[in-house]
Amino acid sequence: MVKSRLITGIFMVFLSVVLGATAAHSLPKILPMPSVESFRTGVDYLQLMGIILMIGSLEKLAMPKGVFRVLIASVVCFSGSIFVLAFKSKIGFSVSFLGPITPIGGLLMMFGLGRWAWNIWKG
């Protein structure tokens, strides 16, 4: 389980590097700058959560299974919705329903990190 969590974190950081390079070099040619900046925010949080998941795979800081799942869901909701919304001008249908998903993802991040801190505090 530790190995799969570490690999998940590494994959998220890897993906953030790929998406960050795309945001820096390709997206400004096809999207307006506010959309590119939003996309970069999604990349930043994807990378941050990947690093957190890698730290959470360390034995002494073991992240409970439920917290791990909440943090995965949080980054899918937060970064995933931002990525799709950044392309809303290029998508042939409305994706405005995703707008409220972004803050839900942020709340899930706060909850998951708070719960993990509580578990570490309690030993």
Image: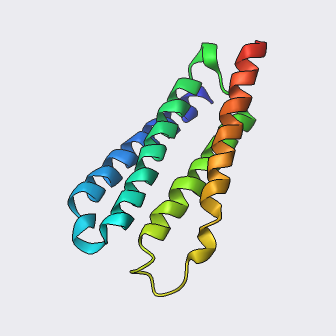
Q: Is residue 64 visible?
A: no
Q: Is residue 119 left or right of residue 95?
A: right
Up/down of 101 relative to 75, above or below: below
Q: Is residue 94 visible?
A: yes
Q: Is residue 71 left or right of residue 6?
A: right
The residue drawn where x is 56% and y is 35% is 4
Percent position of residue 105, x then y:
63, 52
The residue drawn where x is 34% and y is 54% is 19
- Residue extending furthest bottom? 92
The residue drawn where x is 75% and y is 23% is 118
Percent position of residue 103, x then y:
63, 55
The residue drawn where x is 49% and y is 61% is 82
Q: Is residue 118 left or right of residue 75?
A: right
Quadrant where the C terminus lies? Answer: top right
Up/down of 115 relative to 78, above or below: above
Up/down of 18 relative to 66, above or below: below
Percent position of residue 9, x then y:
49, 36
* 68 or 42: nearer the viewer: 42
